[in-house]
Amino acid sequence: MFPCLGCSQCPFVLKGREFTHPFTGQTTQLRGYYTCISKFAIYVLTCPCGLINKHEITQMVKSHISQHRSSINLRNMSLPVSKHFVEKGHTAV
């Protein structure tokens, strides 16, 4: 995935054509060219503690990242990602 270089979510995109799982070391090659404005994508959210969460989305990636960051900053305990971040003391920056 690559940043679109035009949105506030770009700093949270890890640039590259592959993803390596932090625990198993398994590397997955990305097929295609994806940016923050891509739709119908699968992306991986990595947590500061090393956990990962895979998302299949139909909206733009930047919108989904923004929603995650907002729910974390609002300390929304009804959503799994924000609940984990709040319980573990992580921040969305």
Image (cartoon, grey):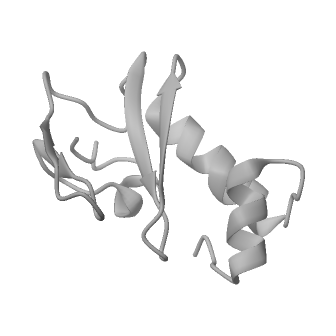
The quadrant where residue 88 appears: bottom right
Residue 29 point in image, percent of width and height:
10, 35
The residue drawn where x is 88% and y is 58% is 77
The residue drawn where x is 80% and y is 47% is 79
The residue drawn where x is 78% and y is 61% is 83
Residue 33 point in image, percent of width and height:
15, 27
Which sits in the foreground, 24 or 16?
A: 24
Which sits in the foreground, 93 or 56?
A: 56
Query: Where's the C terminus, which quadrant?
Result: bottom right
Q: Give the side of residue 18 with respect to residue 55, left or right.
A: left
Which sits in the foreground, 55 or 37?
A: 55
The residue drawn where x is 60% and y is 70% is 92
Q: Residue furthest front?
A: 24
Which sits in the foreground, 82 or 49?
A: 49
Q: Is residue 62 above or below residue 41?
A: below
The quadrant where residue 21 appears: bottom left
